[in-house]
Image (cartoon, helix red, strand yellow):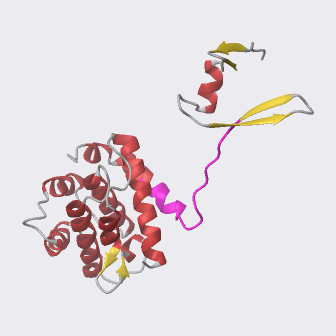
Amino acid sequence: MKRKIIRVGSSRGVLIPREVTRAMHWDFGTEVELVMNQERKEVTLKTIKISLPEEYNVEYLRQIEELMIEHEDVLGGIDD
Amino acid sequence: MTDDQKIQIKQLCYVNWLITKKFGGDAGVRDLKSLKNVVSLPGGGSLTCFQGERLSNRKDLYSQLGWFTYYIVDGEPFNGKNRTVALMMLIWALKFYRLEFEAENMADFVNTLDTLKQGNSDISLWLSNNCR
C-alpha cells in the first residue's frame, strides 16, 4: 500500500493504517523494530519478539494462564 | 539463593505481571527481600510444590503452601495483587496435585487472611481441612 511522508513537528512520519495495527496487535506505546536496507531502498517494520528464558517451565505458565481464565470470577474479587 | 529459588521468583514475577495485566493494579517487585522469603523454606529449601511431582505426601504440600501464602500476604513483595497471586498459585498447585477444593471458599479465606492472627501453620491446617 502507498503512504505519504507527513510532517510531525520538525520530523517526518508515516501513518500506519488501522487494519495494519490491528492485525499486528500494535497499540499506542508498542515498540517496533525498524530495519533499513539502503541498497534495496526498503524500510521494514517488525514486531519485537520476546522469548521466555529457557529455565521457565512454559507448560506450567500456560496452565496458570488457563486457570486464571477459568477462575476469573474469584480471582477478580480479591481485595488487594 | 539456590537456582530453584531464583526460578520460582521469576515464575512468581510472571504471574504477578499476568494478574495485573488481567485485573489491573501495579505490577513489579516492591520488596525483593520479602519475595526471597516467599520462596525460601527453613533450612535453605525452596518451594518444591511449584516444581512438579516432588512431594510424596499432602502434609508437606500443605506445609509449603502455608509458608508461601503467609509470606506473600504478610510481606507484600509485589507492588499490587499480592493476595490474588497467592490465590492463583494455590489454585494451580492444588490442581497440579489433583486435589479437590472450593475455589470460592479459598478466595474468601485468602481475602480475609489476617497474618497478625494466623500463621503459616494455620493456613496449612485450613488447606488440610478444605482440600481432598
Where's residue A8, x and y in %?
63, 16
Is B111 drawn above or below residue A25 in the view shown? below
Q: In the figure, is residue B12 to the left or right of B129?
A: right
Q: Residue at x 65, y 43 (%)?
A: A48
Where residue A33 sits, quadrant-wise, is top right
Q: Quick check: B116 left or right of B127?
A: left
Residue B40 in the image: above or below residue A9: below
Q: Pinpoint residue A62: horizontal percent, then vertical percent.
A: 49, 55
Camera-side residue of A36 and B116: A36
Q: Position of residue B74 (x, y in %)?
A: 20, 63
- The x, y position of residue B4, in whole percent, is 46, 76
Residue A56 is inside the magenta segment: yes
Q: What stretch is highlighted in magenta?
A: A46-64
Residue drawn at (42%, 68%) of the image = B8
Q: Nearer the viewer, residue A58 or B75?
A: B75
Residue located 12% across and 54% down the image: B112
Q: Which residue appears at 39% of the width and 77% of the height?
A: B48
Judged from this view, the residue extending furthest toward the front is A10
Residue at the outermost right position: A39
Vertical relation: B73 (above or below) A3: below
Q: Which of B2 and B112 is in front in this view?
A: B2
Question: Which image quarter: residue A39?
Answer: top right
Please tell me whether residue B60 belongs to the stretch shown in magenta: no
